[in-house]
Image: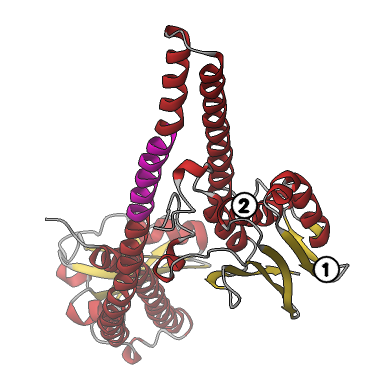
């Protein structure tokens, strides 16, 4: 039978707590037993001293056996000698006598060879030999040496209460861990599904330019055609190769953004300097499409981030406007506001815009809406705005798309100062 997480957790807690409790109880019982033994030995020692100094046997317990021996262990007196037959054997080899001979005091619990019953013996040395006293090791004597049961009962009650509390803690913690585990599994499943979808989409997107390049080159190799048509096929082959190159570049960048924080170093980046370089890259397209560019950002506006990613944000937004917004439009870069942590930017165009139902999806990989101006035939990887979104999020900002009040598309986003 499979045990769920919270039950396993409770069993772990139970095992650890039980071992700890058993060790504490065992140590306490041992210490109390030693303490009671020492107290009993002290009483027996007092009895032996009374016998040695005063011989006051009438003051001693009636069940107390008294044995006096010389230094060689020969019995000189035993108050129970009348119960034996003949001379008592030498007692030097008795455990309590041997221990007393070595340390001055000794004790043992054993069956008496003389009386044939268990006794608790205590012996001590004297100038003339040994004095040994003994009590019957019966129920009363055993109880005297046993630890107090009150502490044990108290510990058992606490143990039961603690187990109940541990059960509730383990159940609560188990529920939390199971939810966390379910969340991680769901996240991993979603990530795997997204990766699978991404792989499928990439495969599909790669197939288009690769097929075009193969088709055009096979036709050029196998068919005689006029120079004008050959030039057209070469131009189309080149365009497909450019699209393939852009696709591979954007896939590589997007993968780096998603999989690694450490792959990108951060620095202070001048935004107007970035925009100037982007405009220089697209100068030919801007000029040929008669696009008016307006940069409404003060000098000295800097953000903290990775140069490659910040550049990719403004490059892809500019490329998106240049390719799809149309001709004779206005392209604006605006600083809306700033606070202690972020700058808030807008990149707007006055072109044909995007349909309202597509605004929430334009940041998806390879997504193309119904707008005829934004088609696969116009080139591009279909990953530009996805890269923009991931780059903004990687820098702790937010991004959204909306209709530009004057017509066209407006992309609003924030970057850390």
Which is nearer the eye, 142 or 136?
142
Residue at 31 percent of width and 84 percent of height? 158
**Based on the displayed image, in which of its 4 quarters is residue 330 positioned?**
bottom right
Q: Residue furthest left?
A: 1
In the visual, does 194 lie left or right of 261? Answer: left
The magenta region covers: 188-206
Q: Which mark is residue 301?
A: 1
Query: Quadrant where the C terminus lies?
Result: bottom right
272 above or below 206? below
287 above or below 242? below
Where residue 367 appears, x then y in whole percent?
42, 53
**Based on the displayed image, in which of its 4 quarters is residue 147 positioned?**
bottom left
Where residue 334 appears, x then y in whole percent?
73, 71
Residue 191 among magenta residues:
yes
**Based on the displayed image, in which of its 4 quarters is residue 35 positioned?**
bottom left
Which is nearer the eye, 41 or 328?
328
Judge whether residue 60 can be spotted in this image: yes
Residue at 37 percent of width and 61 percent of height? 96
Where residue 331 appears, x then y in whole percent?
69, 63
Q: Residues within 10 Å of mark 2 (few under 14, many from 20)?
A: few
Q: Residue furthest right?
A: 299
Where residue 88 appears, x then y in whole percent?
25, 59
Q: Residues within 10 Å of mark 1 (few under 14, many from 20)?
A: some
Label 1 sits on a secondary structure element that is loop
């Amino acid at each position: 039978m499979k045990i769920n997480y919270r039950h396993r957790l409770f069993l772990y807690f139970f095992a650890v707590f039980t071992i700890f409790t058993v060790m504490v109880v065992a140590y306490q019982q041992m210490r109390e037993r030693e303490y009671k033994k020492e107290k009993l030995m002290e009483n027996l020692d007092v009895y032996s001293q009374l016998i040695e100094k005063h011989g006051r046997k009438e003051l001693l317990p009636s069940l107390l056996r008294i044995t006096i021996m010389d230094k060689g262990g020969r019995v000189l007196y035993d108050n129970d000698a009348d119960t034996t037959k003949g001379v008592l054997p030498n007692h030097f080899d008795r455990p309590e006598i041997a221990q007393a001979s070595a340390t001055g005091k000794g004790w043992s619990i054993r069956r008496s060879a003389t009386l044939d019953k268990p006794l608790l013996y205590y012996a001590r040395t004297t100038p003339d030999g040994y004095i040994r006293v003994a009590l019957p090791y019966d129920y009363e004597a055993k109880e005297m040496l046993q630890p107090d049961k009150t502490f044990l009962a108290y510990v058992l009650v606490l143990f039961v209460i603690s187990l109940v509390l541990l059960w509730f803690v383990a159940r609560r913690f188990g529920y939390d861990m199971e939810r966390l585990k379910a969340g991680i599994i769901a996240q991993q499943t979603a990530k795997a599904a997204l990766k699978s979808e991404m792989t499928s989409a990439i495969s599909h997107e790669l197939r288009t330019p690769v097929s075009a390049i193969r088709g055009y080159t096979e036709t050029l190799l196998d068919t005689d055609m006029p120079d004008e048509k050959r030039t057209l096929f070469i131009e189309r082959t080149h365009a497909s190769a450019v699209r393939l190159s852009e696709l591979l570049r954007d896939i590589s960048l997007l993968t780096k953004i998603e999989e690694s924080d450490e792959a990108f170093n951060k620095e202070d980046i001048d935004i107007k300097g970035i925009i100037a370089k982007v405009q220089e890259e697209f100068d030919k397209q801007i000029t040929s499409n008669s696009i008016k560019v307006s940069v409404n950002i003060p000098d000295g506006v800097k953000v903290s981030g990775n140069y490659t990613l910040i550049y990719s944000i403004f490059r892809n937004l500019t490329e998106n406007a240049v390719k799809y917004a149309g001709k004779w439009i206005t392209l604006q870069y605006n600083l809306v506001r700033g606070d202690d942590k972020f700058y808030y930017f807008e990149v707007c165009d006055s072109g044909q815009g995007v349909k309202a139902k597509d605004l929430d999806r334009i940041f998806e990989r390879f997504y193309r809406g119904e707008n005829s101006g934004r088609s696969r035939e116009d080139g591009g990887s279909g990953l530009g705005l996805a890269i923009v979104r991931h780059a903004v999020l990687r820098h702790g900002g937010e991004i959204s798309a909306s209709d530009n009040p004057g017509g066209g598309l407006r992309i609003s986003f924030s970057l850390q100062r």
